[in-house]
C-alpha cells in the first residue's frame, strides 16, 4: 500500500473499503471529505499536524451548528484512525479532538394534532398526504424510509408496516396508526396490480419534490413553516408516543435510542402545560383526602 495518500484520496479509499456503509453514510463522509479538503487543503496525510487539526475543528465550531461541526470532526477522526491502523500514519492528528454536540433548541418545534390534520387536509394529492401521515404519525425518516416501502411491507389486516433492510437503521416493524392507515388505504386504491413500490411518483427527485408538496400544503392551510420540516414531524410523533407507551417500545417502533430521543426529539407540549395547571391542586387534595380517610391509630395490630 502506498504511503503518500492525499486527504481526498484517503477519504475515498476509506469509504470504498466500508461495504457496510449505507448510502446516506457514504454521502455524509463525502461531505466530511469536502469540508476537510477545504479547511486543511488536499495535502499528504502525514503533513497534517495536531495543531492544524485543532484549528480546523475550532473553525468548524464557529462556522456551523455544533451538531454538524461535531459530525464533520468525528468522521475525519474515524477515517484517519484507519490510516493509523494501516500504518500510513504514525499518529492520528484528530485522535484527541472532539466537539460537543448541542441540539439547537430554537429549531425544535412541536406540531400539534389540530395543526397536523389541517396540513394533511391541504396536501395536493394522496401521495403527498400519505408521505406526510407516515412522517407525522408513524415517525418515518423522509425520504429514504417511505421510498424503500413496497406494498408487501404494508399489512393492512394487522395494521403494521415493516421498514425493510437497507435503510439507515435496518428493518423494524411498527404500528400503522390511524391517520397513516387511512391515507395508505386511499393510495393503495390508486396502485396498479404490477406496482411494487408504495411511492412510485417523483422517486428520483423525492427530496425536493416532497418538500415542495409539504410547503404548498402549509401555505394552503394558512400556516407558516417550521424549522425542520420533516424532522420536526418525526419529533412530534415521538413526543406523542412517549405519553402513551414505555420508552423501549417507542425506541423499537421509531428506530432510535431513548438517549437520542431525549437529546433531539422529546419536547414539552402545550398539553403538558395544561395538565400541569390542575395537577398540583388535584394531587394536594387527593393526598389530604387520603389522610382524612385513614383510621385513628389505636395501637392494635392490623
Image (tube, grey):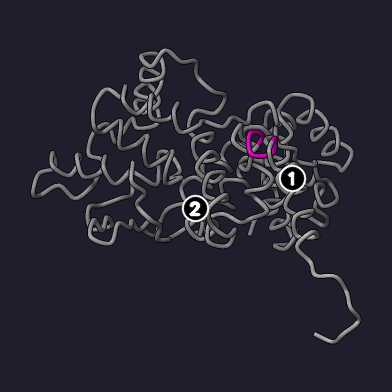
Task: Report the side of 230 relative to 288 (left or right).
Answer: left
- Identified at 33% across, 30% down, the residue is 205
Kindly state the secondary structure of the residue where label 2 is placed: helix
Q: Residues within 10 Å of mark 2 (few under 14, many from 20)?
A: many
Q: Main secondary structure of the magenta part?
A: helix
Segment tinted magenta in the rendering: 273-277
- Identified at 74% across, 34% down, the residue is 66
Q: Is residue 56 visible?
A: yes
Give residue 58's quadrant in the image: top right
Residue 180 screen position, x and y as percent? 33, 43
Disc ID at residue 45? 1
Q: Alpha carbon of mark 2 to alpha carbon of mark 1: how far?
A: 40 Å
- The quadrant the C terminus occupies is bottom right
Kindly state the secondary structure of the residue where label 1 is placed: helix
Disc ID at residue 254? 2
- The mark that comes first in sequence, 2 or 1, is 1
Amino acid at each position: 500500500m502506498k504511503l503518500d495518500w492525499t486527504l481526498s484520496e484517503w477519504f475515498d479509499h476509506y469509504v470504498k473499503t466500508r461495504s457496510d456503509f449505507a448510502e446516506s453514510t457514504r454521502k455524509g463522509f463525502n461531505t466530511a471529505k469536502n469540508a476537510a479538503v477545504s479547511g486543511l487543503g488536499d495535502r499528504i496525510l502525514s503533513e497534517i499536524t495536531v495543531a492544524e487539526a485543532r484549528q480546523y475543528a475550532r473553525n468548524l465550531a464557529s462556522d456551523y451548528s455544533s451538531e454538524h461541526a461535531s459530525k464533520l470532526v468525528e468522521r475525519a477522526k474515524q477515517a484517519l484512525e484507519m490510516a493509523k491502523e494501516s500504518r500510513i500514519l504514525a499518529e492520528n492528528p484528530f485522535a484527541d479532538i472532539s466537539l460537543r454536540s448541542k441540539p439547537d433548541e430554537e429549531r425544535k418545534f412541536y406540531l400539534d394534532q389540530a395543526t397536523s390534520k389541517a396540513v394533511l387536509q391541504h396536501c395536493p394529492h394522496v401521495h403527498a398526504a400519505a408521505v406526510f401521515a407516515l412522517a407525522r404519525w408513524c415517525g418515518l425518516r423522509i425520504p429514504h424510509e417511505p421510498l424503500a416501502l413496497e406494498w408487501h411491507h404494508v399489512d393492512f389486516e394487522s395494521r403494521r408496516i415493516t421498514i425493510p433492510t437497507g435503510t439507515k437503521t435496518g428493518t423494524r416493524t411498527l404500528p400503522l396508526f390511524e391517520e397513516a392507515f387511512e391515507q395508505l388505504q386511499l393510495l393503495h386504491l390508486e396502485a396498479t396490480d404490477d406496482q411494487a413500490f408504495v411511492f412510485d411518483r417523483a422517486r428520483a427527485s423525492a427530496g425536493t419534490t416532497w418538500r415542495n408538496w409539504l410547503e404548498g400544503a402549509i401555505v394552503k392551510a394558512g400556516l407558516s413553516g417550521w424549522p425542520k420540516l420533516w424532522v420536526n414531524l418525526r419529533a412530534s410523533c415521538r413526543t406523542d408516543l412517549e405519553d402513551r407507551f414505555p420508552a423501549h417500545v417507542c425506541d423499537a417502533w421509531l428506530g432510535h435510542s431513548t438517549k437520542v430521543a431525549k437529546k433531539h426529539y422529546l419536547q414539552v407540549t402545550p398539553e403538558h402545560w395544561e395538565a400541569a395547571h390542575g395537577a398540583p391542586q388535584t394531587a394536594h387534595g387527593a393526598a389530604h383526602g387520603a389522610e382524612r380517610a385513614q383510621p385513628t391509630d389505636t395501637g392494635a395490630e392490623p
